[in-house]
Image: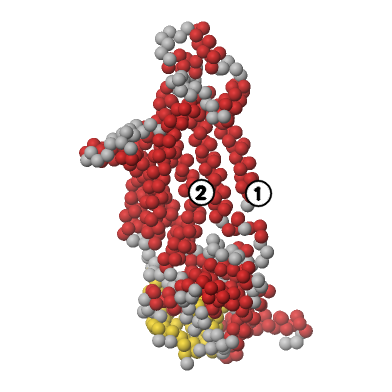
Amino acid sequence: MNKYILKRTIAIIPLLFAISIFTFVFINLIPVDPAEVVLRLWNIPVASEELIAQTREDLGLNDPYVVRYFNWLADALRFDFGVSYATPQLTVAQKLAAAFPNTLQLASLSFVLVIVISLPIGFLCAVYKDSWFDKLMRAFIFLTTAMPSYWIGLVLMWVISVKLGWLPTSGNFNGFKSLILPSITVASSYISIFIRLIRNNMIENMTQDYVHYANVRGLKQMNILVKHILKNSLHTCVVAIGMSIPQLISGTIVVENVFAWPGLGTLCISSVFARDMPVIQAYVLLVGVLFVVFNLIFDILQGVMDPKLRVGGEKNA
Amino acid sequence: MSILTVKDLQVTFKGRKKTTEILKGVSFELQKGECLCIVGESGSGKTMTMKSIMGLLDTNFTIKGEAFLDDINLLTASKEEMRQVRGKKMTMILQNPMVCFDKLYRIGYQMAETFEAHTNWSKEEIYQKSIEMLKRMQLPEPDEVLKKYPHQLSGGMLQRIMIGIALALNPDILIADEPTTAIDSVTQYEIMKEFISLKEAGVTIIFITHDLGVASMISDRLIVMNKGLIVDSGTFEHIKENANDEYTKQLVAQKKAVVAAFKKSLGGRN
């Protein structure tokens, strides 16, 4: 088992390397001269040739690409992503650190909502397959899958905040109240995915021989459903559930912008509009690393949960 | 004294478009201490008969007829009553032991949950019973076996554990659904020895198989099923000489041919 963990961990190193290269290359392929961007952002009206050349020199843009890449990578490993072009008084790390907790709040509440809502519904849909409840939920899944989350967000905002006035429309000035609508919006698309995942996994498990044998042994129905079928289904869902965490963190971009939530997504979009390259670069790298790390964690977790992998080495019977 | 009476059992499957008759009137009786073999090819309704009297069919099936275990009406009993019958009064051994246990739980847990479902024994009593059954099934180091996961044990061992679970609560009837089909021939031989000694110990057994040879080893009485009907019944000797149905004749002929070939290879005497 330890060997397995070590092997998986070593395997992500080249992957992280590749992510950093792609991030660097794609951002530098943007046909904009960073020096001009900087001067524009600093509101320097007429940029003379000498000034642009000077700025280029200051930003280290005249070095060869390879040197720049390794400089950037070495700094990134120390969480130093340079200074934001848009706000020279702040480093990129500071900007990310300010935005990240907000996104984390949003993603966590969404994750909790997804699990709390989809687990019982998926369970009931599987148990009462083809009942009116299951059919209703299937229609609901179909509908929510077809509705983009920014649209759901706008509808919620209009009905609940504007018409009914129950919750604030946007921003994060009202504590928990402000968090509710964005979280529901982010969660909505994942809820239908997970209901379907859990339902189908459970239905698939119900036809397995171990369930038949559990019935033959006269176990109580609730025991079979929860301890055997549900546990086995969750077992196969664990990676999908784990991977939804980085997806939630990165997937808040659109919703954050709809609700003017000052998280990573809003930061990313405003940086894109400002061509604030160090911030975009850092954001892309961060999200890439999140995906890889979460994938690793949940792969290992699944291994730990599977007795076959966990105690596989000592087969002696 | 007959312990199980099945009268004119009919099972139909209602699909989306058509309904299929699976059992078309099956009747038989089982005496206490008897070993009844049900022989037939795949799809002849052997397993279906057992599933229907154990209440293991879902609502897509309609069941008609009568089935009594002592005085319990198996076809009208509630779900909870049937649950209590299954695993306690009627126990069953399935054909593929490798996939019948939940791979996420240790053997000890799966034995214990079965006993918990039917008794109010303490943890200690359950543990003692588990050890006792594993010893009775001649598994080495029973307390180690309890700590194993299914994938750590061989098919033969899992089959023995299954038999152990089935016998633990002194069932009225032990149903064995092709218990030797999915395991290798050496283990098959050992498992058959196990069944023969169970039979000698007076356990009432229904033994389902498609192998007439196996049936001849263990049966007191034989039922041959084909296409949802009982086509022949009686002792093995009786059926061997007086087969009515084409299918039975074919089975007997095959069996005789195998025996002839075997004897020939041993010494040419027939």
x and y percentages locating residue B150 in the rendered image:
59, 65
Q: How is the image coloured?
A: secondary structure
Q: Quadrant of residue B178?
A: bottom right
x and y percentages locating residue A171 in the rendered image:
33, 33
Q: Quadrant of residue A221?
A: bottom left
For the point 60% across and 87% down, the residue is: B200
Q: Nearer the viewer, residue A45 or A141?
A: A45
Q: Is residue B179 above or below residue B223?
A: above
Q: Is residue A30 visible?
A: no
Q: Work out which residue is located at the far right of the displayed protein and give it.
A: B267
Instruction: Please give the residue where the numbered disc 2 appears in the rendered image.
Output: A239
x and y percentages locating residue A316 in the rendered image:
68, 64
For the point 41% across and 9% down, the residue is: A45
Q: Nearer the viewer, residue A249 or B72?
A: A249
- State the CA–CA distance, disc 2 to disc 1: 20 Å
Instruction: Please give the residue where the numbered disc 1 appears in the rendered image.
Output: A3
Kindly indicate whether the residues beneath marks 2 and 1 are on one polypeptide chain.
yes
Q: Nearer the viewer, residue A82 or A188?
A: A82
Q: Amino acid at mark 1?
A: Lys
Q: Amino acid at mark 2?
A: Val
Circle 1 sits in a helix, a strand or a loop, which is it? helix
Q: Is residue A2 above or below residue A314?
A: above
For the point 39% across and 83% down, the residue is: B73
Task: Say whether disc 2 or disc 1 marks the residue closer to the N-terminus.
Answer: 1
- Relative placement, left or right, of A230 versus B193 is left
Chain hosting mark 1: A
